[in-house]
Amino acid sequence: MKRLLIILFASFCLSPHLGLAAVPPDLPPDVKTLRVNGYDMAYTEQGSGPPLVLVHGSLSDYRTWAPVLADLATENRVIAVSLRHYYPERWDGKGSDLSLSEHAKDVSSFIEALGAGPVHLLGHSRGAGVALLAASMHPERIRSLILADLYPFKSLLPNTGAVRAEMEKRKAVSRAVLAHYERNDPEAGLIAYVNHIVGPNGWDRTGEAPRERLRSNTWTLLSLLADPETPLKCAALSRVIAPVLMVTGDRSPPIFAYSNDAAKACLPNVDKATIPDAGHMMFQANPAAFAVEVQFFVADH
């Protein structure tokens, strides 16, 4: 697998910041951009009140939050951001600046550039990992933190048989997905990844509009799977002073429960919520229940 990654990513390192201003000029009318760390971050906003910033996960972008935007915006200024190299940029996979740490720096700088004071920060999956890293970098910029199915940081997870088994599954999926990309069949890679995260036949159960959103972020998945492990220790999480809500779906893959629990043990102020009748994409499967949990938590802080 190491040889495969070297082959696939040799070109990335030759131009580490290719396409810094690559967000296309033909943006939808509701999409704005904010210059952050030399890159134009695209975002939408809706509602008024205390700012709530939403950070998407893998193969996603600001559009992924559409099912919950209206509800969340009833009491808050909701800002859904697209991370570096995700749609609306048409990224070709070249460059070495798509990583958890790079995205965390971008999100932290984005919050500062908004000039709206400390924000409520909500992240999903890999985006929850980005949000947690951003909060540990600049805790003073975070009013509260909502982590939905937190990205599994290997440095935090306990070394148990159950955890090792789940991580081996993830490695096997990564190898299979990367093999599809090597054969120049990224669609097959997308299907394999979605079926792993969502469940058997997950791609078949995905509508055409969501599929197009996935396809528009195809090459971000390739870089994601090769992202070096970002070490995160309990000592760093002790700097996160904001209250935290850990959210999961009652049908989410087990690795996310292990990840949530591992981070919870390191954070000083944590609540938990489970969304019924929902898996990893809980805010799409049961948007009303998800929005209620987030709204109650944000209102209390």
Image: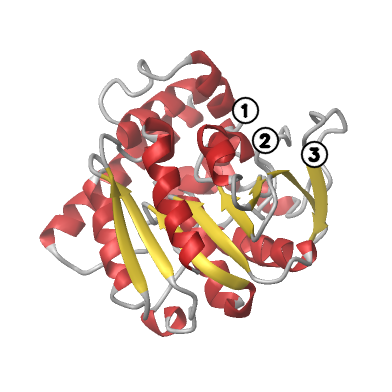
Secondary structure type for disc 3: loop
Residue appearing at x 43%, y 50% in the figure: 125
Secondary structure type for disc 1: loop
Question: Residue 19, position in %: x, y?
Answer: 80, 44
Q: Which residue is mark 1?
A: 216
Near-viewer residue (141 or 37): 141
Q: Residue furthest left?
A: 161
Picture quadrant where residue 92 is located = top right
Question: Disc 2 residue type?
Answer: Tyr
Q: Relative to 173, is 95 on the left or the right?
A: right
Residue appearing at x 62%, y 79% in the figure: 140
Colour setup of the view:
secondary structure
Question: Disc 3 residue type?
Answer: Val
Question: Residue 265, position in %: x, y?
Answer: 28, 75
Q: CA distance from mark 2 to mark 1?
A: 6 Å
Q: Relative to 254, is 70 on the left or the right?
A: right
Residue appearing at x 41%, y 20% in the figure: 206
Question: Residue 190, position in %: x, y?
Answer: 45, 28
Q: Which residue is mark 3?
A: 23
Along the polypeptide, which appears first: circle 3 or circle 1?
3
Secondary structure type for disc 2: loop
Label 1: how many Cα within 10 Å (few below 14, some 14–19, many 20+): some
Q: Is 155 located above or below residue 293 in the figure?
A: below
Would you say residue 185 is visible in this rendering? no
Q: Which residue is mark 2?
A: 87
